[in-house]
Image (cartoon, rainbow, N blue to C red):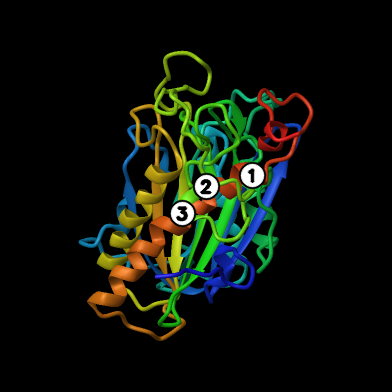
Amino acid sequence: MAFRTGARNLITDVAGLRVGNAHDLGLKSGVTVVVCDAPATAGVQVLGGAPGTRETDALEAHNSAQEVHAIALSGGSAFGLDAASGVQAALRERGIGVDVRGQRVPIVPSAIIFDLINGGDKNWGRYPPYRELGYEATQAAADDFEIGTAGAGTGALCSGLKGGLGSASTMLSNGVTVGALVIANPVGSVTVADSAHFWAAPFEIGDEFGGLGYPSPMPANASDIAWKFDERPQPGANTTIAVIATDAILPKSAAKRLAIAAHDGFARAIWPTHTPADGDLVFGLATGQSEIALDMHSAMELFAAAGATMARAIARAVHAATPRERDLFPVWHSRIE
């Protein structure tokens, strides 16, 4: 089963989705928003031990909300949960939301990473800036967007390197598209030991994150654990958060299954992952715009592609990171210079 990327190699290759970024380079933090052109079926799976979320309970299959209007991913730890209010404000201005007796209520699940310790100035005064960043990111939503040191990935870090915002897409043989968007900020490493070789190398398409493959021979210390700050990790100080999306028709339960499958990409791209110190989470979205319903064989292909696409997006996040003033960690490109 050979995979190929979509035209942009971004989550916006999935019909019906746009992405917007807003960030403050002095703050070293920001917001990324996935905006649905029409309400999309959604699910979520949390596997990290320290998540920070809003509206995720509504996505469980036994609860009444069936669709969402946007997904907000933010820096700022718990302060970043304000971003969803800005997204709601921008959508409500456009008349978007669930109609409840004449009142429009946009459904915007959200998740945050911890990026408070990254060299940025967090002295923002009485109120954090994330509500306004959420509004700006929604207004900026488009088919094309920046990855790397952008949006919610602006201040992301991983073990030994800057993290970032990543995205990738895959076209399946039946015409379905799957796309991933991720903020890579794990306590673990995305490269083999201290090399430039990504753990996600087997899934790379072309040279999308350097084309280096695996080191040969594999270094003896490849399985050693290198924590982000070379100390015992603290709960809540990390986290990789993501969206996996498809244009196939999926019920709410299958959107959750899609999110579960995408977590395999975390395991193939990050060592270690899903730790008690990470709040690892994936939102699953199905826009249905391909009008393709899946049989069991097609669903298996979709779920396999979800993990592979997510692994690629994580590597692309780190590969695309760029240096800024007061950075605590170097960028990936410094390892090949």
- Three-letter code for the amino acid on which mark 3 is drawn: Met
Q: Is residue 236 visible?
A: yes
- Please state which of residues 77 and 186 is positioned toward the viewer in this rendering: 186
- Please state which of residues 10 and 333 is positioned toward the viewer in this rendering: 333
When the figure is inspected, residue 121 is found, relative to residue 44, above or below; the finding is above
**Could you tell which of marks 3 and 1 lies nearer the N-terminus?**
3
Q: State the separation of the CA atoms marked 2 and 1.
A: 9 Å
- Residue furthest to the top in view is 231
Residue under label 2: 314
Residue appearing at x 39%, y 77% in the figure: 248
When the figure is inspected, residue 136 is found, relative to residue 189, above or below; the finding is below
The quarter of the displayed image where residue 146 is located: bottom right
SS type, badge 3: helix
Query: In what quadrant of the picture does the C terminus appear?
Result: top right
Labelled pair 2, 1 in contact (Cβ < 8 Å): no
Labelled pair 3, 2 in contact (Cβ < 8 Å): yes
**Could you tell which of marks 2 and 1 lies nearer the N-terminus?**
2
- Three-letter code for the amino acid on which mark 1 is drawn: His
When the figure is inspected, residue 69 is found, relative to residue 124, above or below; the finding is below
When the figure is inspected, residue 327 is found, relative to residue 214, above or below; the finding is above
Residue under label 3: 310
SS type, badge 1: helix
SS type, badge 2: helix
Decide: few, some or many residues near mark 3? Use Cα within 10 Å; few <14, some 14-19, many ≥20: many
